[in-house]
Amino acid sequence: MEATPEPWRAWPTLYREMEIGKYWVKRPEDRIWSYVVEASIEELTDHLVQQIVEGVHGTTIRAGAIKLGTSHPPMTELERKTFRAGARAQKETGVHITTHCTRLGAETSQLTVLDDEGVDVRRVVVGHTARHIALPEYRKTILEWMRRGANFLPTNLGIQRGREEVWRPLVEGIHEIFMAGHGDRLVLGLDSGYCSESKAFGPMTYLPPDPWTHMFTHTLPAFRAMGLEDGEEKAMMETNPQRILPVQ
């Protein structure tokens, strides 16, 4: 009897091209997964589809999202290749795309490539965008993309006791987005990992332990104290993810 696949609970990643000295990158050849350099767009697309349809690394655990990444507004050629492959895999499989996007302007280059490839931007979540939303002069760019359907994900919300107020501009930005009628395009998230930038390979230190519960022990209580409303929290933490996550 054929084995029943496990639930959709992992995702294939084509990460950004990184500078020497960031994370684990010690040599130029480490800047991006070597397979990305060697493979064609078609081969990368097939790789992503296989992990979504069949399973990750020979297992029966099927990926439920595609992770793509850039940092700077101008994409590198290798990053553009990964976004085109991710777009084509998304259209073939119906999972959503989530991105790594840390610099202002990178959201526009990412969404433009995906849109050019025919991806419905309502199936895209642009990650690490707390600063994008917190800056009043930049929110109009985010709101324009939200009007077109794109979703945005503030992450890495490291709340330090006694310094909660540095996050007030983000809470105010969230209010403005909801008042503009685009609160259905916001989700909150957390992120953690391992790196070796200044010491032996180990956990990142931008969130205190345990990073996986920090959202509930630190971030949400601080945001509530700064005026985050129940309806806003429910939309970002429950309603919107329930719309985005299912395979379509």
Image (cartoon, rainbow, N blue to C red):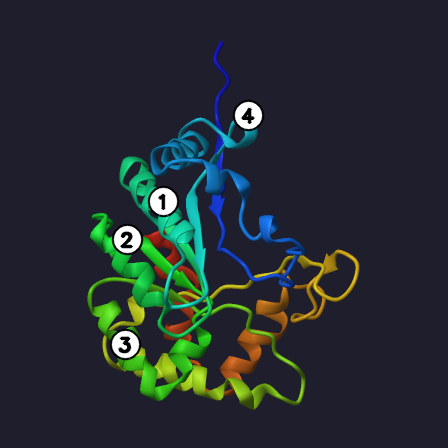
Q: Which mark is residue 42?
A: none
Image location of residue 138, percent across then percent down? 33, 82
Q: Where residue 39 appears, x then y in whole percent? A: 43, 35
Comparing 27 with 190, the one in front is 27
Q: Secondary structure at mark 1?
A: helix
| Mark 4 / mark 1, whichever is N-terminal | 4
* Residue at the image point whose x is 62% and y is 68% from the top: 214
Q: Which residue is mark 1?
A: 86
Residue 134 appears anywhere in the view: yes
Amino acid beneath label 1: Gly
Asked if residue 30 lies left or right of residue 143, the reply is right
In the image, what residue type sits under mark 3? Thr
Q: Nearer the viewer, mark 4 or mark 2?
A: 2
- Name the residue: 48% across, 26% down: 5
* Residue that mark 2 sits on: 114
Q: Is residue 122 visible?
A: no
Circle 4 — which element? helix
Which residue in the protein does label 3 denote?
141
Residue under numbered circle 4: 58
For label 3, the SS is helix
Of mark 3 and mark 2, the one earlier in the sequence is 2
Specify the farthest residue to the right. 200
Mark 4 or mark 2: whose residue is earlier in sequence: 4
Q: What is the distance, in whole Å, between disc 3 and disc 4 at their CAs?
A: 41 Å
Q: Mark 2 touching mark 1, by CB under 8 A? A: yes
Separation of marks 3 and 1 at Cα, in angstroms: 24 Å
Cα separation, mark 4 vs mark 2, equals 28 Å
Total tally of numbered discs in the picture: 4
Q: Residues within 10 Å of mark 4 (few under 14, many from 20)?
A: few
Dot placed on the residue nearer the N-terminal end, 2 or 1: 1
Q: Are marks 4 and 1 in contact (CB under 8 Å)?
A: no
